[in-house]
Amino acid sequence: MGGAASSEPDRPDLQLGVPFSALPEGGLFVGRVGDEKVLLVRRGEEILAVGARCTHYGGPLGDGVIDGDTVRCPLHHACFSLRTGEALAAPAFDPIPCWRVDREGDKVFVREKTTTAARTGGGTGVSGGAAPPASVVIVGGGAAGFAAAEMLRREGYAGPVTLITADSDAPYDRPNLSKDYLTGEMQADWLPLQSAEFYTGRKIDLLLGTRVTAIDVAGRRVRLDRGEPRSFGALLLATGADPIRPPIPGADGARVFFLRTLADSAAIVARAKEARRVVIVGAGFIGLEAAAVLRGRGMTVDVVAPDRLPLERVMGAAVGGFVRRLHEAHGVTFHLGETVTQIDDRAVTLRGGSSLEADLVLVGVGVRPAIGLAEKAALTVDRGIVVDEFLETSAAGIFAAGDVARFPDPRTGERVRIEHWVVAQRQGQTAARNILGRRERFASAPFFWTQQYDVTLRYVGHAETWDEVRVDGSFEGPPESVAAAVSYLRGGRRLAVATVGRNRDSLIAGIELGG
């Protein structure tokens, strides 16, 4: 059987067949069917064929890792079923295709695509015979809120779902706000996680520009700043976090920006068209990603932070020193061990007395969880909304997920709150399944990535403190060619791994850490 002309003729045409002996046991083999890349996985005598491109950002699944019946993307650790193609774990939501495979003697042939039953609508989606909640209200349209709404429908829940967000924009790809979108070359219509038709087609009532003002726990409803209250059978709080606004004189000026929403990023993009000198206050992930993008746009960039090294508090001296060297190689100037005491119309004044000219000031000194609603509703809070291993709050039927949730870490037993996009998405998915009665513990190993210039730093696991750091590889040499993995241990137990140029190591660490 012939296929269409391929843009990659070097890939074997799987419709013409490949030797069974050429397929490594438990390994990955990439061929093509027409113009589509296809991934073959051999499990004993069984051969499975699925799409070779991740549906998140097109990552090459042939460079991924197999874990049981799952393939993991090397870029952002999305997980797909090898048997059904379903996107099992965020950040991917759409499935990959599957193909029928025949074996004739020693040859394996890939035939037509197969179809699997779509798990969208048409059932209660509730496990264990429990009655489904009469309705579900989700407060917050970020990563956790969107993922929960999508999963409710994918699991077949047919009741009313309302997604309420104070943002004027439908759920969008927030990580890009400090990456590609900030370059000014990415159009805003590329950012939405789904089209408007997605919400109408799945009967998700999306309320934009709407704030929940109070939760009536006993009456099972939420009050809004406009419109009638909304009743709920189950409630998910995915209220996220708000930027910390330090009390710096002049920080409310027209040249000072914070970066949290699409509107924030768009405002920075507009200002950057005229700016030549940028001062970034804070050397965290957002500030450093913005520094890389704005430096790439030809601006003079100064970074001010009280730390000894960027990211040292969360990733240690080895990574912190590497990140500093990476930015300095691109012309960024650091002012470490410093704080800002004044921002005026032309400059930023530092505690040490020096002054930095600035056309644009970006403040990125961290965020605080948005717990006001939970506090007013008398839910248990402690530097976040306290939830159990099922992401349920102190009130039955009310759940919390994402940046706002403080949950028990199964690796340490400690309560933690993690501000990572993928964690929020996966918590939203778990919360949705638990709203439907699954009683599924959230045990996914946290995953985070940051892209700065042409370097991607990946971090899997979570180590708030550690007593030992092990470096495999070297951070010496040109930053873009570095390949190293850093393990963070406490009491001899590995809690987290950071990698540069070692995608496979990051994937394996995620599996070993329970992700």
Image: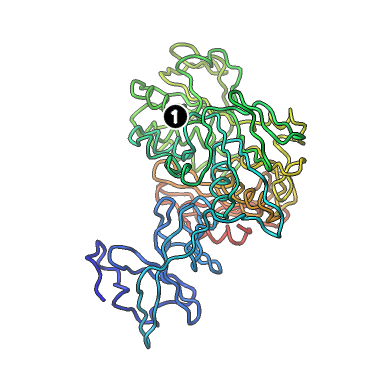
Q: Quarter-wise, where is residue 129 in the image?
A: bottom right
Local crowd at mark 1 within 10 Å, few (<14), some, or many (≥20)?
Answer: many
Q: Which residue is drawn at 69% across and 57% down?
A: 493
Q: Whole-percent x and y of residue 363? A: 52, 25
Q: Whole-percent x and y of residue 262? A: 46, 31
**Residue 13 appears in the picture as rendered:** yes
- Looking at the image, residue 88 sits to the left or right of residue 400; the answer is left
Instruction: Name the residue beneath numbered marker 1.
Output: 265
Q: Whole-percent x and y of residue 394? A: 77, 41
Identify the residue at the far top of this view.
345
Q: Whole-percent x and y of residue 494? A: 65, 56
Identify the residue at the far bottom of this view.
105
Q: Residue at x 60, y 57 (%)?
A: 515
Vertical placement of residue 486 versus 81, above or below: above
User: Which quadrant is home to the N terminus?
Assistant: bottom left
User: Depth check: 273 or 242 in front?
Assistant: 242
Vertical placement of residue 381 versus 504, above or below: above
Q: Which residue is drawn at 54% across and 58% down?
A: 88
Vertical placement of residue 428 versus 492, above or below: above
